[in-house]
Amino acid sequence: MEQENPVRHETEVHFWGNTPEDEYYKQQGIKASRSSYTSPRGLSLFTRSWLPVSTDPPLGVMCMVHGYGNDISWTFQSTAIFLAQMGFACFGLDIEGHASPKGFDGAVLVAPMCKISDNIKPRWPIPDILLFVAKFMPTLAIVPAASILHKSIKVESKVPIAEMNPVRYRGKPRLGTVVELLRVTDCLSQNLRSVTIPFIVLHGSMDVVTDPKVSESLYEEASSEDKTIKIYDGMLHSLLFGETDENIEIVRHDILSWLNGRCRHENVEN
């Protein structure tokens, strides 16, 4: 069930400045809307869409999933807006948990967390202690963890923009969240061979938040016949916002080339 134009935490400032959303989207040459979706568990999930203004069919449909430290209403929008300008229909939601690729024709994986980097993973015996305590107090926010914001963003002037996000979680990770991240990423890292869909995985070589070596393992072990990997020398975790504008354009170009090479082919066949 969807509800159009739901009430949400509104702020006068967006990551692009004070320009109202509708006016900014018009300036960017796209259409955008927001709504809410009630999940089977009864939770109201906030959703957004970013669409080309053209009445022609879109080149493809992009189902966009944000990461653990992000949401769909701040800097995440910059990539969705770019893809809508390029002819793709983009959709995203503030997720409750994590997504599954079942039923998708392909995937663009940007610095994916197939495994928690050893550089930020709690050392033994902390994981065992967390697992035990989480059984009784899963919402307790006491997990020791360094801030990943400065580790993710290379351009220092962009850090304050990311910090201004009004809905960004600033507390310590909750026990239940950390336990699930450890469990799921451990499962993912052991089942890379089961990946069969076409994909491109993009990672910065200097990423210390998610491990580029695991992306390399995904590329090597996945059963997909159509797979591509891009490792960007010297780049950090936030490839689509935190890098220099020149680097962001390189990553965007690689994503767009990969999408166009497949979506245009599919459209011709159909």
Image: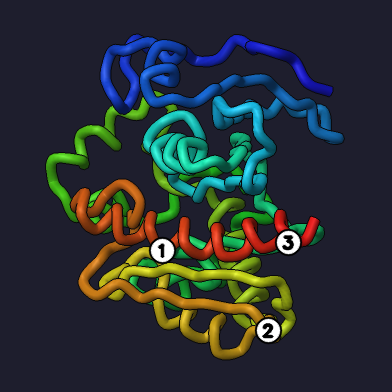
| Residue 227 drawn at (x, y percent) | 58, 78
Q: Mark 2 = which residue?
A: 225
Nearer-the-camera pick, 258 or 191: 258
* Circles 3 and 2 in contact, beta carbons < 8 Å: no
Nearer-the-camera pick, 224 or 171: 224
Q: Mark 1 = which residue?
A: 254
Asked whether residue 138 is in view, the answer is yes
**Type of amino acid under label 3:** Asp
**Type of amino acid under label 1:** Asp
* Residue drawn where x is 38% and y is 58% of the image: 253
Position of the N terminus by quadrant: top right
The part of the image, by quadrant, that contains residue 208 is bottom left
| Residue 18 drawn at (x, y percent) | 28, 13
For residue 105, the mark is: 3
Q: Secondary structure at mark 3?
A: loop
Residue 211's place in the image compared with 5, above or below, is below
| Residue 67 drawn at (x, y percent) | 50, 50
Work out which residue is located at the far front of the displayed protein and give it.
268
Q: Secondary structure at mark 1?
A: helix
* Circles 1 and 2 in contact, beta carbons < 8 Å: no
Residue 175's place in the image compared with 186, above or below, is above
* Residue drawn where x is 65% and y is 27% of the image: 55
